[in-house]
Each structure stands twice: as structure tokens, then as C-alpha cells.
Amino acid sequence: MKYISTRGLAPMVSSTEALLNGIAPDGGLYVPAEMPGGDALPDWLEPSAGYAGTMRGILSLFFDDVPESVREAAVARSVARFAEPENPVPFRAVGGNVVFMDLAEGPTAAFKDVALTILPTLLQHAASVAGLKKVAILTATSGDTGSAAMRGFADVAGTEVLVFFPKTGTSEIQRRQMVCCPGANVHACAIEGNFDDAQTAVKAVFADEKIRADAAAKSVFLSSANSINIGRLFPQICYYIMAWRELHAAGTLGADGFDVVVPTGNFGNVLAAFYAKKLGAPIRRFVVASNENCVVADFIRTGVYDVRRTFRVTNSPSMDILVSSNIERFIFEISGRDAASTRARMAALKGTGEFSLGADCGAPAAAGFVSGHASPEETEAAIAAIRRETGYLADPHTAIGWKVLRDLGGRGNVPAVVAETAAPWKFPATMLRALTGTCGADDFANLRALGELVGRAPRFAELENAPALHALVCAKDRVGETVRAVFGI
């Protein structure tokens, strides 16, 4: 498979090259030159394939120039890192024809683990093919990608990782997952700003020809572990295919297909569902759920993407994002893969903070997209309602998805799969306040209290006394300097 840039000014590349580059040279994002159709792998619903077999099938489509032995090794390494290697993504019916798709059973308890336990093997192979001494992986995180990237790449030969996270905004558990992560080749740096500041700065580093040239002179290649990288995006298709199979096997899938409900920040997870539909998954609606930073939800509803608003720190920090990178891929697809119009809209967003869909683009609703959002208070009310009505302990992001699904209504008998994007243990203060009306200032005391409340041993208690291994802090206009210092370029 070959890949092209959404902006149309970069050469076509192989999947190996796209993996390494992360972002295309023209600033665009890589997409398949030709998207495979529903006949690409005709045995999607064969139960014997299982999770590992389905993931191998996905990788064979989107990374066909990577040897089969490498793809096999990537999948084997990935599943071994989940709580249940034979069933890394459990599905749990919670009533009302709603199924929670648990994506939080990996090493860092976030959906990012699915792809970030696979990407290291693929990227290591790509670096070997290119004859590189080292791949330096630069990543911005709103909370979950950082620790997943660090854990995924820790001690992987020929790689080094630097994660930038907001100094204020992540939960204490999320922060300590990063600053306490072992591995001689992984680093975390708090940025004095929010996620958008970090992501903008990281993109500026990728666009800085001097930094890239200086890195290349030392046989160091800059790449990314964010969902801008195809190695993050396309493996996520796997669990939407698994959802299709799960509903088919349960006998609940009718002629109208099923809805997917995705708590959305950087738009990569729901975009993976969009691509799953192109591979044949009978997804009727894509329910996009946002918090108060609801730029994406508003865009789905109005066709106007406008980031000119106040950034809010909320109790669903992984969605505290205004500029969602993968919107660019979505615009490219719904405009009929028109690179010129995509390029113009991205220029408008950069220049004015806004762009609109015109007659050249299909409306998000025409592609099956609907949206809604929740305030912090509504998020906590949803956590409590889910617990009260189903007995399920859902994290703040998942609770927003559940709440938006209910608000939208109009589902009839169509089953809905809600992406459970993180474990509740990562947000103990919010969870405890939602369930009891109060919480303390100490996140680890909250974690213990939450465990006692629900009668379960909490995850991440060991982080309380874990040594802090990463203490870097930088201003948002000093990211380039920090990259040079950490990577030795």
C-alpha cells in the first residue's frame, strides 16, 4: 500500500516511510492512496480469527511492505502486554442494547495501548530498513498517550522517546504514570501550557528543517507516536471490526447495523471507526462525545471548526483539546479526497482559527456523524447514573459518551458500542466525588477510598511511592531547545 499526504504536495511513500515520517513533508497527514474496500479481507466475521488474527489482517492491509514475520512479532508483543492476551478488548453488555468496549486493559489502562504496543516493533523495523542509528519519537499528550508511548517504547533498541504533557490538567495518576516510568530511553517533560500548546510546538519541531537536518547529520530521525502517525491510527480499526463480530455472534445485529460512541479529543479513535466502515463494518452512526472543549462536537453539528474560545481544564482531561489533528484526514475524505481544499482549510485554521465546510464537502451528518457534549457536572452525574443503573464503574470520558448517546436518542433497537477509553482508577478524585459527593486533595487517598467503596483493589496504587525519574519542565516556546538537548542534536 502507498500513502499520500492530505495536502497533496508531498511524494507518495510506502507504509514504512510513512511510519518513519509521521507527518508528511508538506505538513499534511498520510492516508492510503487507495482505501481498501469491504472485500479486502472477506472473513471478518469468522470467529476463529480472534483478536490477534483480526489485528494481523489489519496490519497486512495497511503495512503490506512490512514482512509478515515482523507483523506477527508486533501482534505477539502487543497481546502479551494485556491483562488477557487471548481477549485484550472485552465487550460487556450493560442493558438497553448498549455494549461497553473495554479498551483499558493494557499496561497503562487507556485505549492508546492497543496501537502503542504494536508501533514500536513496526517503527524499529522501518528504522532498520532505512539504516538509521536512532529514531527519536516526539509526542504531545493530553494525559494518556504519553505514558502509553513511554511504556511501549521503553528499552526498545534504536529508539528514544520524549513526551510533552501539560503541567496543569492531567490527573495525578496520569502525571505519575509518566514521571515514574522506567526506561533509559524514555523522557517526560511538563510544558507550561495546555495540550494544544504542546501539540503546536511538536508540529513546529517537525516542520523545522534545521532541527531535522541537524538530527539527520547524526543519523537520528524524528518521528511521532501521536495519532498523526499511521502506526497509531490504523491498528485501532481492529477493535471496531471486533465489535461488529461481537454483535453478529450475539445475534443483536440487525439490518440497520450498529452505532459507535466515541469520547473524542484528537479525533483519531472515531476516525478509525470511520475507516472500519470503509472496510465493511455496518456502522450506522458515529456518536462523537466531547467535554466543554467541544470544538469537534460543534463542528459535527454546524460544519464550522472554530478554536477561538477559552480553553477549559475539565475532569475529563484526555479530551481537553481544541485543535484535533485528525480532523484534517476527515476533511480530506469527506471533500472527495480534495487535497487543495484540505490545504486551504488547514491554512485558514492556522491563520484565523476557523474554517467552514463548503459545497465541495459532504456534511458530517451525511457521513453518519452526530455529536454532543457534557459539562464537568454532567460528567459526574453520568458516572453516578451508570453505576446506579448498571453496576458498572465507568471513567469520566466513557461516561460522557454514555450521556451523549442517551441525549441524542432516536436509536430504536439499533445496538450501540460505547468505547471505554480509560480505566476509572486514573481519575480517582472525579470518580469519588461523582459517587459520594466528596473527595480529598490527595489522589492516592482518593484511590484507596474508591477501591474500598466499590470493593475492588485499585490499579496504580504502586505509583504513590514510586520514584520520580523525569523532572524536565519547559516553557511552550522552548520545546525545540528541549528536543535538541534530550536527543543530543
Image (cartoon, grey):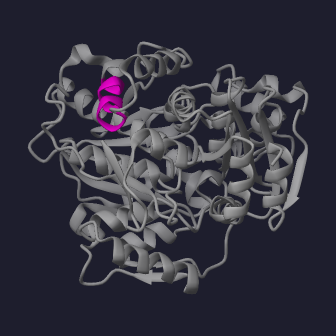
* Image coords of residue 302 (percent x, y): 37, 79
Q: Quadrant of the N terminus?
A: top left
Q: Is any part of residue 195 visible from this angle?
A: yes
* Image coords of residue 459 (percent x, y): 69, 25
59, above or below 475, in the image: above
- Could you tell me which residue is drawn at 34 percent across and 38 percent down? 62
Q: Main secondary structure of the magenta part?
A: helix
Q: Is residue 99 left or right of residue 290?
A: left
Can you tell which quarter of the image residue 83 is in?
top right
Can you tell which quarter of the image residue 245 is in?
top left
Single out the residue that lies furthest toward the front. Answer: 217
112, above or below 57, in the image: below
* Image coords of residue 278 (percent x, y): 22, 48
Magenta-tinted stretch: 54-63
- Could you tell me which residue is drawn at 57 percent across and 85 percent down? 351
Q: Is any part of residue 437 visible from this angle?
A: no
Single out the residue that lies furthest toward the bottom. Answer: 352
Q: Is residue 270 left or right of residue 477?
A: left
Closer-to-camera residue (32/420): 32
11, above or below 189, in the image: below
- Could you tell me which residue is drawn at 71 percent across and 32 percent down? 450
- Could you tell me which residue is drawn at 24 percent across and 63 percent down? 367
